[in-house]
Image: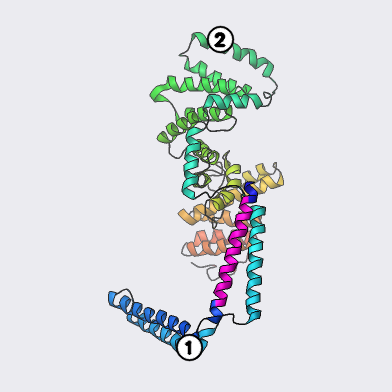
Amino acid sequence: MAFVGQIAGFVVIAVMVVVVLLRAVSRARTGGAADGVERAMRVYRDQLREVDRDLSRGTLEQAEADRLRLEIQRRILDLDKGERGAGVPSSPRARGVMVGVIGVLLAGAAAVYVQFGAVGYPDMPLAARHADADAARADRPRQAQLEADFAAARPDAPEFEDRAELEPMVAQLREALANRPDDVRGHILLAQNESRLGNFPAAAVAQARVVALRGDDVDVQEYAFLLDLLVLAAGGMVSPEAEEVIEQILRRDPANGVALYYTGRMYAQTGRPDLTFRVWRRLHDQSAGDAPWMPEIRAALPELAQISGEPRYQLPPRPAPASAGGRAPSAADIDAAMEMSGEDRAAMIEDMVASLSARLANDGGTAEDWAQLVRALSVLDQREQATAILQEARTVFAARAEDLALINSVAEDVGLSAGGPLDGAP
């Protein structure tokens, strides 16, 4: 019934729009020409007065004011020459075309709304959506409820080679710690092994005990491990208890990657993808390319940007892995990469090259660094970019003959043109 009512309402509004437009067309045809000229003249006179006011207030230059006056006066002359009626559909055929266009547009709008619109939903202004998201965040289930829901639907515990041996050992450790509640080392081992068995709720309890026993000496990484366990125990949901741990981490380390990743996930789960975009964009820009969250956030950022009103956002190149250190791949790196798949090998080398290129652009580097970059780009068959880097290196080291000779030697080795105004410069 709601659907029928909305369609009926749409039809009524459409008919009213058509009637109003038809009356406007009729008035445009039958209205006196003198009235139209007079209205246009009033507009132009108002514009001239506005120019004078802006000039007197100092918000308009004299030259600009003169130009605007001439333009307005030209329009007045055009009006006197008979151009007052341009654009008014006076013939029956023109009116018929207009009516047809209006009908097609209205029918198309109705069809698009039925297919893609949210029929049955009321208007949802931005402020209302944000208020709903805040309410969803405040009312989301607690950790215990999320764990119970996930336990009812969770898959079987993971199987691995020595699971049968580990389970009785963990059971013994649980019994021992029941009599030694302040044994920090024992609870650390229990948290790690409960996690390995897939007993994430029990692992989270053990890790929470570790954090409590550490007191003021607790390490951020111990908080981060607790956060991981809480989210895993809740089936990927960020509970209020997990959010409290996030706050503890960010208070100690505002750039902590684990906390920022789960902060973005929490906002996504509670209806604020715009905040997820902001947090994950920052996380992406500060993370190494091999960070565990990088695949997920790189896949999500373009869509999050569109949802958040950032249509011009361009996903930057994947950062270099933490092991790259902002250098080009050495011979040892390339030898090690030969054991990888072709796709992984190319990705590793490209990440390292991108990292070195960014470092040289921002901080500069030695001639050896520039030569490495030229060689690596040539190996990747990025000849145009390699040539551009080569020319830039020649400019940077133009006054240092030894460094320039090294760069030119590498260019010759990789088959790049040795020509250029800086070749052989002292």
Q: Residue at x 56, y 33 (%)?
A: 237
Look at discs 1 and 2 and give the one toward the viewer.
1
- Please name whichever residue, 236 or 318, is drawn nearer the observer in this view of the structure: 236
Residue bounds of the magenta highlight: 5-26
As shown in the figure, which amino acid type bears the numbered disc 1?
Asp
Q: How many marks?
A: 2
As shown in the figure, which amino acid type bears the numbered disc 2?
Glu
Q: Position of residue 337 (x, y in %)?
A: 66, 43
Q: Is residue 228 above or below residue 129?
A: above
Distance from Cα at disc 1 to Cα at disc 2: 98 Å
The answer to whether any part of residue 259 appears in the image is no
Q: Position of residue 181 (x, y in %)?
A: 47, 12
Residue 187 placement, left or right of 101:
left
- Please name whichever residue, 74 or 395, is drawn nearer the observer in this view of the structure: 74
Provide the secondary structure element on which disc 1 rests: helix
Q: Residue at x 51, y 22 (%)?
A: 207
Hey, which quadrant is residue 22 in on the image?
A: bottom right
- For disc 1, the marked residue is 78
Provide the secondary structure element on which disc 2 rests: helix
- For disc 2, the marked residue is 175
Residue 24 placement, left or right of 107:
left
- Please name whichever residue, 334 or 48, is drawn nearer the observer in this view of the structure: 48
Furthest toward the bottom, the residue is 81
Q: Is residue 208 within the magenta segment?
A: no
Q: Position of residue 141 (x, y in %)?
A: 53, 29
Q: Which mark is residue 191?
A: none
Q: Is residue 233 above or below residue 411?
A: above
Mark 1 vs 2: CB contact within 8 A? no
Q: Residue at x 50, y 30 (%)?
A: 242
The answer to whether any part of residue 184 appears in the image is yes
Q: Is residue 41 above or below residue 220?
A: below
Tell me which secondary structure the magenta stretch mostly adopts. Answer: helix
